[in-house]
Amino acid sequence: MFPKSFAVSRKISNFIKQASGLRRLASSLATITGSPCPPRFDVAVIADLIEKQHWSKLGFHVKDINPNELFRQLISSELNPDLCLRYYTWLVKNRDISVSLELTFKLLHSLANAKRYSKIRSFLDGFVRNGSDHQVHSIFHAISMCDNVCVNSIIADMLVLAYANNSRFELGFEAFKRSGYYGYKLSAMSCKPLMVALLKQNRSADVEYLYKEMIRRKIQPNVFTFNVVINALCKTGKMNKARDVMEDMKVYGYSPNVVSYNTLIDGYCKLGGNGKMYKADAVLKEMVENEVSPNLTTFNILIDGFWKDDNLPGSLKVFKEMLDQDVIPNVITYNSLINGLCNGGKINEAIGMRDKMVSAGVQPNLITYHSLINGFCKNGMMKEALDMFDSVKGQGTRPTTRMYNMLIDAYCKLGKIDDGFALKEEMEREGIVPDVGTYNCLIAGLCRNGNIEAAKKLFDQLTNKGLPDLVTFHILMEGYCSRGESRKAAMLLKEMSKMGLKPRHLTYNIMMKGYCKEGNLKAATNMRTQMEKERRLRMNVASYNVLLQGYSQKGKLEDANMLLNEMLEKGLVPNRITYEIVKEEMVDKGFVPDIEGHLFNVSTKS
DNA sequence: GTAGGGTTAG
């Protein structure tokens, strides 16, 4: 009865023996050759377990199989990529297994082939968000393992977007560049957030690069991207280039919109130099000619531009114009006007404007109060400043550190240092943390009052907190210098370098001025050498002015004359202060410098 | 979605 079945089982057991022998052989070969032996498993069974999410069963089933290896097989077996993704998630989340970049992107390639784009998008979002520490170049290498450029482009594009959406702009920028090297075509949709982020970080040159690359790679920009580029160029004063981009826009079939024009107008307003408002006005005319209506923002830009160009009547005229055109002013409009009025010393009119805004139903905000309190402070109206400060507190608005700093500075400038300190204590009681600025105002106040010992004490307190900044050092150095204690200032110069604060032009100018004041021209010149040789900072006009004053006051007029020639040879333009020094210390004393005529031209121009 | 306002100290 049994022989047949016995024979069968013998066959089976032989087969198993052979098979296990082969497997042993293969695995021992694998250890020798290093090539893995594909483990035997049934894809259908595993797929079924994944689909039913029977994870513990799956765990048991695959316990002897290398998870990465199994994953590789699953992807190669043309198993539904959704199931592969599910298995991947389980591996990473529940079994804490990291999957190689190559396999990860193999998965993404198969998802892309199955057009599971939203799954790739959310996958990459998580991949980037969880702080993947993979290098961008390794990722691109993994992407390039697939030959399909279209699929790779889609993945690269989504990667750039994921970086941008997760504020990993540096990596996003690198991914953008690498996409170019690999010839992957990105979409304008992914480039835009990257561009906006770069703009927000004031990296205008990078925005410009991105734009040029988009054009080169034939990624069609849209109105928004064009406007971002225009803004980046305007922010760096490259107005002609900004205009060129506006022309490019037309070439691509887009008309500049109100944002494009506003950006350009604002660019001109914020540009230095003469006639900027004339240019801003010309753009305004141009936009109207092109049938783009100015909006609230346009008016706000102009109002702010005019008073900052010392043309407060211009601002008020624009304000009237906007009311005539039934454009409703907002809090920005009023804040700008109030700031302009305060700046022009018209405090009462500023208060009037505040009343006007309130009756127009526009609620003043923190910026309004900042402007008004600053206006009071700058015009010696301490009582009014404090009253407004109290009313802010009374409204339940928490005053800011800077608001306190404005008041503390105002007290100090009135010589009421004690009141300044009282305010500092008040802010500490209120739990508002004094910052370097608070200390700097007080230290400067003490120095001005000649109490440098107290200033140094406060400085030491600040040092214990690890807080002093370049300004703190400058204040104290100047304090010492003005008392004829340049040596102590020089000690501070060493100390600041130790703290990792890099001296600037101003730092050396303060030192040179201190030495000159003491008549120690040799030390002043040494300081110059230190600045030029050690810091590679070239003499600027202010530095020359300091030395010029030092030399001429000591009667070394020939040396002063040489300094003047030297600065001119370097292409530096003497300023009003240069002229005053030359006139008072040289010309009035009968010495005519070589470049007197040139200086005269400068002084009449400015 | 892209444009506009304020803030001390040297």
Image (cartoon, rainbow, N blue to C red):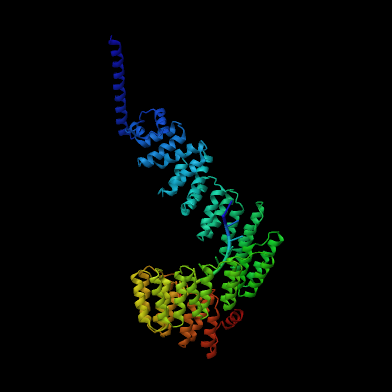
Q: How many marks?
A: 0
Q: Is residue A338 left or right of residue A124?
A: right
Q: Which x, y percent locates residue A66? A: 34, 35
Q: Is residue A312 left or right of residue A44?
A: right
Q: Which x, y percent locates residue A446? A: 40, 81
Q: Quadrant of the N terminus of chain A?
A: top left
Q: Which x, y percent locates residue A196? A: 54, 56
In the orientation shown, which residue stands out farthest toward the bottom?
A: A589
Q: Nearer the viewer, residue A374 or A12?
A: A374
- Is residue A252 placed above or below A564 in the rendered structure? above
Q: Which x, y percent locates residue A448? A: 43, 82
When asked about the image quadrant of residue A348, the answer is: bottom right
In percent of the image, x 63 and y 68: which residue is there? A302
Q: Quadrant of the C terminus of chain A?
A: bottom right
Q: Nearer the viewer, residue A416 or A32?
A: A416
In percent of the image, x 61 and y 60: which residue is there? A242
Decide if residue A285 is in sight here.
yes
